[in-house]
Structures are given as C-alpha cells and as structure tokens.
Amino acid sequence: MGTLYIVGVPAGRADELTLRAQRTLEEVALLVTEEGTPAPDLPVGCGLAAPSVPVTDTEAILAALETGDVALLLDERRAGPSVPASGLIRAALEGGFPVVPVPGPSLPVTALILSGLPADSFICLGSLPAQPDERQALLAAVAGERRTLLILASPAHLPDTLACLYGALGDRPLAVVVVSGEGTEMVWRGRLGQAAGQVAARPDWLGCALVIGGARQPTGRWEKARLRAEVRARLEQGLSAREAGRQLSALSGWPRREIYRLAMEVTGNMDNLDDVTAQREPDREGMLNHVAALPHQCRQAWALTRDLKLPPHHQRANKVLIAGMGGSAIGGDLAAAVVADSAPLPILVHRDYGLPAWADEHTLVIGSSYSGDTEETLSAFEAAHERGCPLLAVTTGGRLARLAGEWGVPLLSFHYRSMPRAAVGYLFVSLLGILQALGAVGDLEADLQEGLSLLESWGAELAPDSPVARNRARQLAQALYGRVPVVVGAEVLAPVARRWKCQFNENGKGWAYFEVLPEMDHNALSGLHFPAGAADRLCVLFLTGQGLQPRNRLRLDLTRQILEEQGIACHAVPVPGRSKLAQALAGVQLGDYVSCYLAALYGADPTPIAEIATLKRRMSEGR
Ligand code: PA5
C-alpha cells in the first residue's frame, strides 16, 4: 500500500524545492498536479521520472496508491489544496492510505512575513470569485473584520482587483508580494487608496499575494444618504431586507436593525410610486402634460414646415449651422444625428456667442430659441447677418422674431406655452422639416409616422397612471433615486443621452452627466476609481437600440460589463424604434418621463429652474 505525499513546490525559483521534497518527487511512482498546473522545474540534475496525471483522475490515482507512492504537487501560489485536491486527500484517507505532507515554499506565508502587518491571526480569502456579485458579497462579509486579510490575485487582473478591494474595504495598509523567477519579494507597500494607480503588473510575475490591514475599530459610519442608496440598490437586485442588512452592516458601520428599518422605509417609498397622485402632486406647473404632448408638438411642427419654400440663397447652402442653447439646441443635435447617414452637407450645432470662422455666405444659419431672447443665440444670428449667411429663425417670438422680420428672413414661428425644453417636439421636428425643404434629406414622412405611433403606444405605458410593474420610466426613476445618473449613448442615441442629462438637471434638479460611445471608452472608462466612494453614488444607463453599428453594440455591452465588474450600478435601457427618427423620439419621451418621476421622488416641481433664471437676470443686469 502506497503513501500519498502532499509536496509543496515552488512556482518561481526551482532551487527553493526542499531536499526532502526533491527526494520524494524522485521516488514516487506517480505525480498528481492541480488542474492547469504543470509539474515544476526541478534544480539541474534532478528529473521527474514518474508520469503525471491531473488531480481529477481520482480512480487512476487510487489505483496507483495500491501499488506505490504518489505525490500531489501543491503549488506555492495556493492557499491550500484546491477543492478537487481536498477530495483526493479525503478519498485517500477513507481508503486507508497514509497521507504525508512534505512542506515547501508558500507565497501566502512569505507574503504575511514580508508585509509586516499583524500575522499571528489572519484571514486568507484565497482567490476572489470572478462573479462581481459573489465577490462583492464576500468582501462585504469581511469588511468589518479586524484581522489581516490575505488575498491571492492574478497579476494580469491586479489593477481591477485593487480598485475593487479599495471600493469594498476603503483605504487600508497594503503589501503587494509577488513570486517570479527571481523568487518571492514585496514589490509595493502603501495604502489601498494609492495602489490602483501605482501598481502595474510585470510580465514576469507568476503569482501575487495582497496583504491588507484589518478594519479599524470603530469603522467610520456612512452618511445616511449613502446607506439609503446602497440599501435601495440591493433591494433592486432582489435581495431581501434582511440580507441587505447582513451585507451592509459591517461595511457601513450601521447596525443591522437600523438597515432593516431603512429597507422597509425604502420599500414603502417604492410602493408610493404606484400612487398616481404622488407622481403628479409635486408637478404643480404640469410638466408631465407637456411630456404627454410630444406627439402633438411633432405633428404641429411637421405641418408648419410642410409647405416651406426656401429662397435660392438658402438652397445653395453647403453647410448648416444651428445656433441655440439648452432646450433650444438639443433639437439641432437630434436632427443632425437623425440625418447623419444621408445628409450630403455638414450640420453643426453652435452653442456660443459669435460664429466660427468657417461660417460663410454658403452656410445656412438657423437661429433656434424658444424665447427668442437668448443672448448667445442672438449674438450668433447677428454675426451671421453681418457675414451675409442665409438665415432662418425658429422661435415663439422675442428679439429673434423681430430681427427675422426686420431682415426679411424666413421665420418659423410657433405658439406653445411651456418652458423651452418642454417644446422639444417643435424645436426638433421643425428642423427636420427645414432640412427636408433644403433637399438635405429624403422624405422623412414614413419615419415620422413610425415615431408618432410609437410615442402614442409606448407613451401609454410610460404615463403617470401606468403602474410601476410595466412602466419602464418609473422603474428607471427608482433605480436612479439617490444616485448620480450617467447616461451613455452612441450614434443617434448620443444626443438622446445628452437630452436625458439635461432633463435630469432641469426637471430632476440633480447632478447628471452623459457620455458618448465610442469616445467614452478612450477616457471615461479609466476614471472609475477616485475620489473614494464616488462610483458608489453613480447609476449608469446604457441606451441601446436597433440599428446601432455592431462594433458600437459590442462596445456598449463590454463597457457595461467592465463597470459592473467594478461594482458600479448599471442598467441597459433599450429604446424602441426601427428608424433613427422613431428611436430619437422614443428616447426623448422615455427620458422626459424618467426625469419627471425622479423629480417626484425627490418631491421637486420639475418646471421651475430658479438658478438658470437668476443667472439670466444677473447676466442682463451686468451689461
Ligand atoms: O431648458 C431651458 O429652459 C433652457 O435650457 C433654455 O432652453 C436655454 O436657456 C435657452 O433659452 P431659449 O430656449 O429660450 O433660447
């Protein structure tokens, strides 16, 4: 009857194999390796004569033990035998075979020694789970642990692992210990908060151990707003209030009882969302009615431009510049994106004073201002007049309408009483009508009809009286509550993402940002880590729709995946619509509803924009 030896073997320097281990390996009849772990390089002069089998081949190994000795190689980068290796050891013991350890080098033990952190008692987590949810749950469970933590990491994933540890555990002492052909050494020592940007893996690193200081006592308590947002996020993921309490207690420094109570409160708030009155109550000036009026606005704007005939000077334009700000500029972005694939001339939106130098007498300048009194737009319009550009104005009145009258330039005037951003149907669709009259695009009638019927059918599901269970806008408002929205879009959904951001600012009265793909993947994707805790407050929405370029669709998925791996709350938001125009309209409608519901959750009236009004007044006084 043979013996099962468990032999500790080095991963880096072959000469770290002990003499006893070397002798054992030379004498056994069979070598057993962990899955994916090759037999070690032995010092010059020694050879491994015995054949090797993977640890999962239990039957062959037990058969070999009947007649001779077997050595199971335990790679120094492991915290202990893997699950299959432990199974083999158990099977050998149950079969009555002696099991004899032959210790060797150990990365975890060397790392603990080199770290200088308390090592008399520690917790070894082994390798972190690859699944973000499981990883977060494991780290949440040990976040309050006061003993030193030891984690084995793959060098290739080191920056991600460090960022994730920092997010979950906060700023703590850290030692990074690696094994390479040169042996085992500590390559970095400092704090978790600095490590993500400073520790870069080298190709010759074979394994890595992270030794992290235990939690301080007492752990700092999170602010209540942060706790509420985290509780909400977990409930949305389907966790029970009890489980949310268990996960968050150590992390947040709040007792489970308190977290449970908060979870109940949050659930109560969510239920309130189903109360129609609760949706409408803060909306004292009727912003929701304007959102519902989007199809009506689009029809009116289309009718306004149906018989539009542009003078010959306009027809000769080879560039289009749309001058506008805020709610009167976004229609330009949307129109430019809708016709981007077909328009034979550049269409640019100008949000500034004056005009760029390239704007010449062949540039159609469209002044777009709901009020007609926006100073930047007027400045661009006046500069265009001086330069002899063909001009056109889209407005409800104001100085812009007066200038158009004075200069005899075409004026598309509409009458709709609302805040400028609430008249988006006019300010968007009228530009499409102008581009069509200019011959810059083909007939958009069919696409518009598709968009209008979508607005009506989907709009019914998004309206305030449609319950949360089938109301995507309300569901998204819930997901965003307590978080900073970041809206990501590509192609025609890029200006839609911008519209959402602006509506979250103006209607929702909150901070919000937007990102455009593919550009975001070349910068914003790196900015996930600092300042500490910032990413925990984000909710990133990825707008998706039919007809996106396949590479952009892939990017969208992969980008979301990377953010989710960092524990950032993300949601894919499919926007219906076959044509770009229908998609743009549906995207605007959805975002507008979400912004109003978010305002309702915060108890804010979506209509007034006090700070913008104050600034406009002060700017006019400062002349
Ligand atoms: O939404 C708003 O009210 C603002 O963004 C305005 O659109 C912006 O200030 C420009 O004003 P106007 O649309 O009247 O040109």
Image (cartoon, helix red, strand yellow):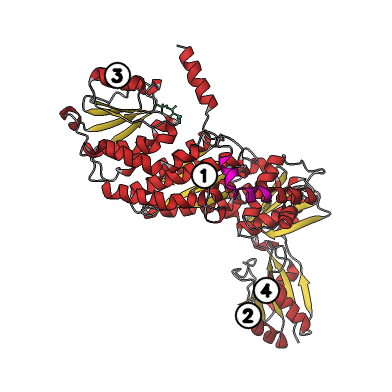
List x then y, in percent, for residue 165: 66, 49
Residue 313 in the image: above or below residue 102:
above
Answer left or right for 405 relative to 59: left
Is residue 317 among the parts visible in the rendering? yes
Considering the image in quadrants, where does the N terminus appear? bottom right
Distance of mark 2 from mark 4, alpha carbons? 10 Å
Q: Which of the two residues, 255 or 96, is positioned nearer the viewer here?
A: 255
Q: Earlier in the sequence, mark 3 or mark 4?
A: 4
SS for callout 3:
helix
Instruction: Report if residue 269 lies within the magenta region.
Output: yes
Amino acid on which disc 1 is placed: Val
Q: Is mark 3 in CB contact (under 8 Å) with mark 2?
A: no
Q: Earlier in the sequence, mark 4 or mark 1?
A: 4
- Residue 57: which numbered mark, if any? 2
The residue positioned farthest toward the left in the image shown: 312
List x then y, in percent, for residue 334: 36, 40
List x then y, in percent, for residue 447: 30, 49
Distance of mark 4 from mark 1, alpha carbons? 50 Å
Mark 3: give few (<14), some (14-19) or many (20+) Cα within 10 Å. some
Mark in front: 3 vs 4 = 3
- Would you name the residue on which mark 1 appears? 594
Amino acid on which disc 4 is placed: Pro
Distance of mark 1 from mark 2, alpha carbons? 57 Å
- Would you name the residue on which mark 4 appears? 84
Q: Earlier in the sequence, mark 2 or mark 4?
A: 2
The residue positioned farthest toward the right in the image shown: 120
- Would you name the residue on which mark 3 appears? 403
Q: Which of the two residues, 168 or 392, is positioned nearer the viewer here?
A: 392
Q: Which residues are magenta?
A: 268-281
- Residue 270: which numbered mark, if any? none
Amino acid on which disc 2 is placed: Asp
Amino acid on which disc 3 is placed: Leu
